[in-house]
Image (cartoon, rainbow, N blue to C red):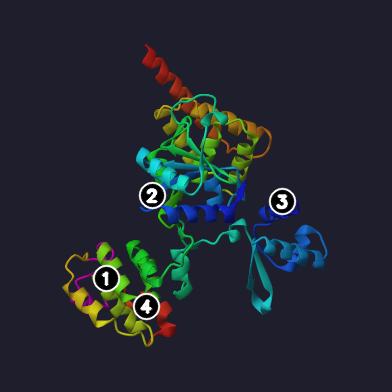
Amino acid sequence: MKNTKYLRIAERLKGRWTVETLRKELGVSRNKAIYTIHRLRKLGYVKTWYGRNKVRVYYISLENQSHKKSYTDVINKYAPVGLAEWQTHYVYGREITAEEALIYALKKRDVRYTIASLALFRHIKDWSALYRMAKKEGLVHEIAALHEVARLFLKKLQRMPKRFYNLALKDKKSRKYIKDKSSSEDFKDIERKWKVDIPLNRADLSEYRGIAR
Amino acid sequence: MIGIKEQEELFIDIGRALERKITAYAIGGTALMLHGIKAATLDVDIVLESEEDREYLMDTMRKLAYNDSDYRLVYKEAKKGIPMMLMGEKVRFDFFVNQVITASFSNKMKERADETHEFGNLTLKAAHPTDVAIMKSATDREKDDIDIEEIYKKSLLDWNILLDAAEEQVQLGNERAILDLGYKLEKLNNQKRIAVPKGFSDKLWKLLKKQVRGKRRKRT
C-alpha cells in the first residue's frame, strides 16, 4: 500500500530535483523531503548526481528500476562527447562489450557515431571476437582504418594485433566506404591503404584534442 | 501484476531458454513499461510475425512451467485476432500473430517500433506509444483510458501518426477504427483528461466521411 503511494509520487515527480526543489514541490519540511527520497531510492526510482558546489541532484524516474543498458550508454561512457539517441537498442542480463559497441556504432553509418566510437579502441580486449563480428558485418577494413586514425589522436593507443592486421589486409569482403560519398581530406594515405573512405577530417576530431598526441 | 524489474527478469529467463533468436513486438502495457511510461501490468501482450515463432516461443515457455490458459476466460468467442495464452505464476502472457483482436499490427507499426530490447535470444521491439493508444481506443476499459491519458501527459501522442494509423486500420479491414478513436478522444477530451488539438477532430471526421462514401460506392 505504502509502495503504491511512493509509486504515484515517482510518477508525478519524474525529473531532476534537489532537496530544496523537492521540498518546495511537496510542501513539506526538509527532513520529510529527504525521507521521501530515501523511500523512493529503496524502491529503485532514484539515481544521484553531484551538481555544482557538490549539490546532490536526484533523478527520479520509473525507468531507474530497470537494469537495461544501451549500446549508446557504453559508447558515451568512453566518448569525449556524448550521443543522444532515439532509436535505442537496450540489452538486459549481460554486459555490452566495447567490441560489440564499436560494431554497433559503425553499423549506424553516422558520422557522429563514428567519431564517438574512436574512443572505444582503447577498451578493445578481445581482438579475435572483434574480427569475427567485423567479418560478419563486412567492417574489417573500416575498423583497421579507423584504428589508424584513432592512433593519431589517442595517447598511447596500442597497435592492433598483427594477426588482426594481416587478416584485415587479406579481407576482400569489406565494404569500400564508411559513409556513402564522403571521404576525408586529411587521411588520404589511410584511405588508400585500406581502400575505404573515411568521412572525417582533423577538425571533426577536435573533441579528442585534449587527449591528442 | 508485475513491475518493471520483474518483467525484465521474466524476459531474461525466457531469452536464456530460447535456443534460437526470436524477434517479437511488445504492445499494450508491456510496451509502455519498456518505454518507462507505466510501472506495472496485468498481462504481457506479445505480437509475433509467424505462427511458427509463436509455437516455438510458447513451447519454450511451457518448459519454464508456464501453463496453457483458455481464451474463453477473457474472450467470448474464438475469432481471428484472439491470442493464445499462457499463465505464469504472477502474470498472463497473450501471444498474437500480426492481428490484435480487431486491429492489425501493420508493417508501418512495426517500423515505428524502433526501440529494441534484447533479452538474450528474445528481442522485443516496443510498439510506439501512439500505436498503443490507437489499439487501446477500441476498448471500454477504464485502465486503457488511464494509459492513453499517461501517453498524452508524457507528450508521446503523435497526432499525425494517430490519423495515419486510423486510416490505415480501416484500409486493413478494421472498419471501426476511426469511430472508436473519435469516440475515445472525445470522451477523454470532455472529461478534460486530454486536450485534442483544434482541427484534429475535423480531420478525423473527414476520414470517416471518406470511409462512408467508399462503402456506399462499393454497395452500388
Q: Compare residues B91 and A92 and report the one nearer the observer.
A: B91
Residue to which mark 2 is pinned: B22
Chain of the residue on which disc 1 is drawn: A
Same chain for the residues under marks 2 and 1 in the image: no
Identify the residue at horizontal 23%, vertical 79% (top origin).
Answer: A163
Residue farthest top in this picture: B220
Of residues A59 and A131, the one drawn nearer to the viewer in this rendering: A131
Asked if the residue under mark 1 is in contact with the one under mark 4, i.e. CB atoms within 8 Å, the reply is no
Which residue in the protein does label 1 denote?
A: A142
Give the number of the disc on residue A4. Answer: 3
User: Do the residues at discs 1 and 3 belong to one chain?
Assistant: yes
Q: Are marks 4 and 2 in contact (CB under 8 Å)?
A: no
**Residue at x-position 56% and y-position 50%:** B33
Crowd tier of the residue under label 3, counting other residues whose Cα lies within 10 Å: few below 14, some 14–19, many 20 or above: few
**B171 shown above or below B87:** above
User: How far is the residue under mark 4 from the one under mark 2?
Assistant: 29 Å
* Real-space CA distance between mark 2 and mark 3, rounded to the nearest whole angstrom: 34 Å
Outermost residue, right side: A29
Q: CA distance from mark 3 to mark 4?
A: 45 Å
Badge 4 is on which residue?
A: A125
Marks 2/3 in contact by CB < 8 Å: the verdict is: no
Q: Nearer the viewer, mark 2 or mark 1?
A: 2
